[in-house]
Image (tube, coloured by chain):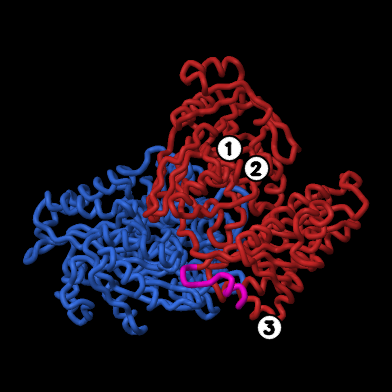
Chain colours: A red, B blue
């Protein structure tokens, strides 16, 4: 079905039924994405204040067959928020719907509007003596509606799950403009199909999330952080199992760090204090959050002794203060920044079954070596089976010299991931950058079911056209 | 679209492409449901051994427009597994697909076929030193495919979530007979719409689940159980918050028990040892599972002292042995059996936001009292906001005397639940018994989206017709 641009006629019609402040002239910042690869278009920008205004916008777009691009914090890494081709869309930014509508500490529930910045949701939970555990690098900019639409991951997934696992209910505007009032605070509700999880992770292609009921958690009584040197990735996987045997759900993060990442840090961000005198080939950052009555530092020391006894570690640092904890995390968090300074030829946000991680790292190295002389920085959320497997030029060479190889590298790495029962998009989503990957690697029966659902709920195809599924 | 019965012609055609043992003559046990309210029909019974055989069955049914009723353990309480009206269906029992296909202790993952009995899945996890936490009264008979299709709840939800939260991936046959191979072991995979959660809780109306990847957990190092007398339901809710402040996720069950339930036990099951000399008006059963280094009995004793100091409890019993723990649970588990001996006029599996439970119990009592002289037994999974709110005749009177009032009672209770932002089916599902409730209380926009999805994935309407949505 042909879509129509959000032109002056469309804007004029909308102005009759919406407050003046809702409709704006497009601004460049809504057309950019963090990696600067694609530039979006915008026929008309809308900043609604209420779900009813969102409904008015989408109803008009559905009637006029105008494409709609929902916009959260704009931090997505796969181009879900920018539409570079086709008729210029109506961009709907949720930034003026940013209220915390309610907090129910006794129920461990918080209701936030879609435009609430993730860090503000975390802070509201903390003020109520609770924890909202979704945590990721862009949390100061990303908005909760976007986090849910992309089923965001981050560093808290090992213990608390993805964004999907942190949501009890949604308010949303469906592609025909009608409002679904589903802001349930219930932990148990078996009344019909799971529309909530269908919208979560749909990247705005099945409707616009306008508010969400979120799960809160008790704050751990004490937290501790350590860096353990491990001989190889298999030891890291075994150490994770040992840590969980000892501390159960108390293990809240388990991040793999490659020596290459520490070398990149030393070269490009020398102000970041190196934790070890000589960067080890592999180390892991372990974070624990324990209940009252347990001492995190003592528990990490016990884990170290046990791990040492079975050759899973050779050296370790246990943070003795909040400042040291922050310093350890700073090492982990600056690795992606150092990566950007070096300039990756190809980056991969992949997951494989946790037990197959060591094999993947070995075979991934071989696959890349077969294509040329490259450096690898493989790091990330090992506890979730999620690695960022990034390929860099050899010392003294630049990314530009290898531009023609990046497709071949990506293809080889993704083919391996697929062969090893993994996912080529672990936490970033499909957006527009990975639509071809989904077509290539996705289960064909699932893809056809997705298309049938998309057509059933959005017959005109107005919602975020070109994202997830090709139009 | 008109459906056709699974007649001899259909059976003859299927016999050409399936092993002899797959197709059987109907047996009465596939036509019964636990409450004896409805009787199903069966034109042809199939007991497939492989997903390919399930695919063959459903493909033929789709071509011939024969209705298909998937059958697990038959323990569902809302008639999802019996089809009393319409053309006699093909009943597909998964009981011969009961294998544990794999266990990955290091990944905390187990892959089970849909026909695996829940207790067998629990045992397989235990053998591997892990916990599969889904636990419910029917676990010796219920099968995991049915548990997932109904998004089963039970006593472990407070800590570990519903069946939906325990599943990483599915293998399923969709309504056109094609196989979706989605047995992912990944914790993070953002590649497209959440078909898994759409099938979970769809009660067999969108396809047949044939196998599932399940999440396992570390076993708690130590467990403890206590019964605390509480003055009223508000104190129970406050005590739950206090317990979670003290023990975080360590609180694994929190069950409300009404004095009426203990009286019913004393009358009808006098062999069950009463925990208190005089049944208190309200008490709670608390179960904790704590990490290494913590003493569950000491933690419960600390909680009791704190609760006593703020008048949240007046008396308590902390189990000192495994036998005592079992005895406390036996009290809780025999209350539904005593209820059945008394004979409820109307039973309600409802949930409300946890903070509103005290108000619901008060107002629910008033609503029922306005309709006549009845006894109430209100008990259940308070930690999940899920109560079983059951209405019984006054002493000396029988259920039959009130048969004409049960609809009015049900309506009054459900109207109150709906007005209080609750659910009229917390953990049992819609099946066929509650289709009218879903129509009455469901969000109309969600219902229409459900119908659109059903039509998109099952255009002929062959999958479990009459369940969840009216045909």
**Label 2 SS:** loop
Observer-side mark, 1 or 3, equals 3
Q: Chain of mark 1?
A: A
- Label 3, on which residue? A309
Q: Do tag 2 and tag 1 residues touch (Cβ < 8 Å)?
A: yes
Relative height, residue B33 to residue A242 (above, below)? above
Q: Do tag 3 and tag 2 residues touch (Cβ < 8 Å)?
A: no
Observer-side mark, 3 or 2, equals 3
Going from N to C along the chain, the mark reached first, 1 or 3, is: 1
State which quarter of the image contains the N terminus of chain B. Answer: top left
Pointer 3 local density, CA inside 10 Å: few below 14, some 14–19, many at least 20:
few
Q: Is residue A305 left or right of residue B79?
A: right
Q: Residue furthest right?
A: A396
**Label 3 SS:** helix
Residue A324 image offset from top left, x and y in percent: 65, 62
- Label 2, on which residue? A76
Disc 1 and disc 3: Cα gap in Å? 49 Å
- Label 1, on which residue? A72
Camera-nearest residue between A248 and A426: A248
Can you tell which mark lies on residue A393?
A: none
Q: Where are the magenta residues, as a range?
A: A291-302
């Amino acid at each position: 079905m042909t879509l129509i641009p959000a032109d002056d006629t469309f804007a004029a019609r909308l102005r009759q039924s919406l407050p003046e402040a809702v409709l704006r002239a497009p601004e460049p910042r809504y057309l950019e994405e963090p990696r600067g690869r694609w530039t979006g278009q915008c026929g008309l920008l809308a900043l609604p204040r209420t779900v009813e205004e969102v409904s008015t916008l989408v109803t008009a777009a559905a009637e006029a067959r105008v494409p709609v691009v929902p916009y959260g914090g704009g931090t997505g890494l796969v181009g879900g928020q920018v539409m570079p081709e086709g008729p210029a869309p109506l961009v709907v930014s949720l930034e003026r719907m940013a209220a915390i509508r309610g907090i129910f500490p006794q129920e461990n529930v918080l209701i936030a509007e879609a435009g609430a910045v993730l860090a503000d949701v975390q802070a509201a939970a903390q003020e109520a003596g609770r924890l909202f555990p979704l945590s990721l690098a862009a949390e100061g900019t990303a908005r909760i509606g976007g986090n849910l639409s992309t089923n965001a991951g981050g560093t808290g997934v090992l213990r608390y799950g993805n964004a999907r696992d942190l949501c009890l209910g949604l308010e949303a505007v469906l592609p025909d403009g009608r409002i679904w009032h589903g802001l349930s605070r219930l932990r148990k509700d078996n009344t019909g199909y799971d529309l909530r999880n269908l919208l979560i992770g749909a990247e705005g292609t099945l409707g616009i999330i306008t508010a969400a009921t979120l799960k809160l958690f008790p704050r751990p009584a004490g937290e501790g952080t350590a860096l353990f040197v491990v001989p190889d990735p298999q030891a890291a996987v075994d150490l994770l199992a040992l840590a969980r045997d000892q501390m159960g759900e108390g293990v809240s993060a388990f991040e793999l760090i490659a020596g290459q990442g520490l070398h990149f840090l030393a070269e490009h961000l020398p102000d970041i204090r190196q934790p070890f005198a000589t960067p080890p080939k592999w180390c892991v950052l372990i974070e624990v959050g324990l209940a009252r009555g347990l001492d995190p530092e003592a528990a990490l020391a016990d884990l170290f002794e046990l791990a040492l006894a079975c050759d899973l570690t050779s050296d370790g640092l246990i943070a003795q203060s909040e400042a040291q904890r922050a310093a350890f995390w700073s090492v982990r968090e600056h690795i992606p920044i150092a990566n950007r300074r070096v300039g990756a030829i190809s980056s991969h946000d992949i997951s494989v079954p946790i037990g197959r991680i060591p094999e993947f790292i070995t075979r991934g190295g071989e696959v890349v070596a077969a294509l040329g002389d490259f450096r690898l920085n493989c790091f990330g959320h090992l506890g979730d089976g999620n690695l960022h497997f990034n390929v860099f030029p050899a010392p003294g060479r630049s990314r530009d010299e290898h531009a023609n190889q990046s497709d071949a590298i990506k293809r080889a790495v993704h083919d391996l991931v697929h062969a090893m029962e993994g996912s080529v998009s672990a936490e970033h989503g499909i957006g527009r950058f990975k639509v071809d990957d989904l077509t290539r690697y996705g289960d064909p029966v699932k893809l056809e079911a997705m298309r049938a659902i998309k057509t059933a709920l959005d017959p005109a195809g107005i919602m975020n056209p070109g994202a997830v599924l090709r139009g």
